[in-house]
Amino acid sequence: MREVPATEFARNFGRYREIVQREPVAVMSHGRPTGYFVSAVEYEDLQRYKNLVRQSFATKDLQHEEVEAIASGRMSSEHDHLNALLDAK
């Protein structure tokens, strides 16, 4: 990621508008980032990710088949010691 002082960023916005298509730009003030300039594609990806993270549901709303699938889930054999802990309950 490229870092640029805020004054440089303001003076040469057009240049950084092109650069941000290849990599994000950290806009710095007094040695600390005050913001990040990212491409529209990267921003949209971030928004999609944030929306996925925010999605939640109440377990009481799960269908019986979903509960059974979760309950019967097992890790790969390399984690048998952890599967044993699940079976012990």
Image: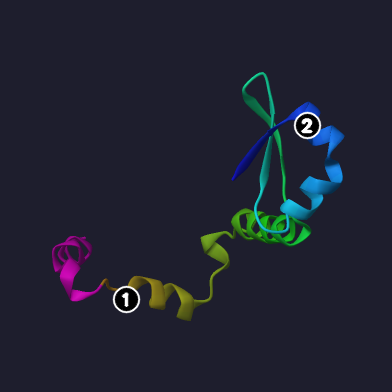
User: What main secondary structure does the magenta stretch of the protein show?
Assistant: helix
User: Mark 1 belongs to which amino acid?
Assistant: Ser
Amino acid type indicated by mark 2: Glu
Q: Is residue 82 magenta?
A: yes
Q: Label 2 belongs to which residue?
A: 8
For the residue carrying disc 2, how many other residues have a C-alpha within 10 Å: few (<14), some (14-19), or many (20+)? few
Looking at the rendering, the stretch of residues picked out in magenta corresponds to 76-89
Residue position marked by numbered label 1 in the rendering: 72
The structure residue drawn at horizontal position 67% and vertical position 18%, both measured from the top left corner, is: 30
Q: Reading the chain from its start, which is encountered first: label 2 or label 1?
A: 2
Q: Is residue 41 above or below residue 25?
A: below
Using the image as rendered, state which of residue 38 and residue 21 is in the foreground: 21
Image mark for residue 1: none
Q: Is residue 7 above or below residue 68?
A: above
Q: Nearer the viewer, mark 2 or mark 1?
A: 2
Q: How many marks?
A: 2
Q: Which residue corresponds to the image point at 28% horizontal and 73% vertical from the top-left?
A: 74
The residue at 86%/47% (across/down) is 14
Closer to the camera in the image, 48 or 59: 48
- Relative to 39, say whether 9 is above or below: above
For image coordinates 74% across by 62% down, the residue present is 41
Residue 80 at x, y percent in the picture: 15, 69
